[in-house]
Image (cartoon, rainbow, N blue to C red):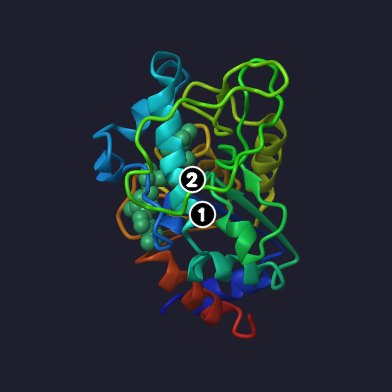
Amino acid sequence: MQLGADLVSRLQRARRVVVFTGAGVSAESGIPTFRDRQSGLWCNCDAQALATPEAFERDAALVWGWYEWRRSFVAASEPNAAHRAIAALQGRVAQLTLITQNVDDLHERAGSAAVLHLHGHIGRPYCSACRSEHALPPAATSTSDGGGRLPPPRCSRCGGRVRPGVVWFGEALPALEWEQAVAAARGCDVFLCVGTSSVVEPAAGLTRAAIAAAAATIQVNIERTWLDELVTLNLRGPAGTILPELLAAVWPDTR
Ligand code: OAD
């Protein structure tokens, strides 16, 4: 990997590093991203149209079934080399903040601690009436059609309708996580933006905040994004290949 001596030394000297991830990081684990067509496998639906409070109001069984289908992908998946490289980075820099838009737990399963989940967790549904957490049985690990439409369970406390524990379009991000993410992006020396199309706000604003704060910004993606011209460096290719190469080039002792 050709990085240039200046950038390598800047990365090696960095004390505060932010890694900001999107669905592309989990793609190599077999979890469909949002803007590919795989959401059409069983319902021919647009993922963005399903991830809204209005969709759940209109057709709760369709939305719940879709999230159960995605949960089955997560249960059947293992962390990949990108998740592992990010976890390994933890021991190499003084302060690492990991911010993800992903609702899976693959960063945690790879060994990352204190992950800021901006868009919630697929495995932590809660009651839409009283907001109590609702324990789910282990997901079926089939990656087929996930059973299609499925009525959501009822809350054992109040009988309200249980909803997925994710943040939908039009909903506020969890306040504490967002505050911590913004502070980390504004205060970092290096910002790695990995496997995200950066089209969903306000999360995409984190990279802009790091650019404004004059951090070294590195984007890892298999495709171009609108950030290509704005970041310090674009590393084109799958995160599971690029991140281990980046670590080997900058922090050769990383395990
Ligand atoms: P997207 O599906 O929008 O984008 C995935 C990005 O990952 C694309 O830019 C791909 O080019 C890239 N990609 C795919 N495979 C990759 C790989 N192996 N290595 C590196 N890059 C790869 O997913 P997000 O950007 O995460 O929000 O989407 C952001 C949010 O929009 C999601 O959290 C979700 C969604 O709608 C909500 O549900 C609120």
Q: Nearer the viewer, residue 123 or 118?
A: 123
The image quadrant of residue 34 is top left
Q: Which residue is mark 1?
A: 75
Q: Nearer the viewer, residue 149 or 12?
A: 149
On the rendered structure, is 235 left or right of 210? left
The image quadrant where one finds the C terminus is bottom right
Q: Residue at x 66, y 37 (%)?
A: 135
Q: Answer yes or no: disc 1 within 8 Å of ligand 1.
A: no
Q: Which residue is mark 2?
A: 71
Residue type pointed to by label 2: Arg
Kind of element beneath mark 2 = helix
Residue type pointed to by label 1: Ala
Few, some or many C-alpha atoms within 10 Å of disc 1 (few <14, some 14-19, many ≥20)? Answer: some
The image quadrant where one finds the N terminus is bottom left
Q: Residue at x 44, y 21 (%)?
A: 60
Kind of element beneath mark 1 = helix
User: Mark 2 and 1 residues: CB-CB less than 8 Å, in contact?
Assistant: yes
Q: Is residue 243 above or below residue 2?
A: above
Q: Is residue 229 visible?
A: no
The image quadrant of residue 56 is top left
Q: Nearer the viewer, residue 150 or 245?
A: 150
Residue at the extreme right: 94
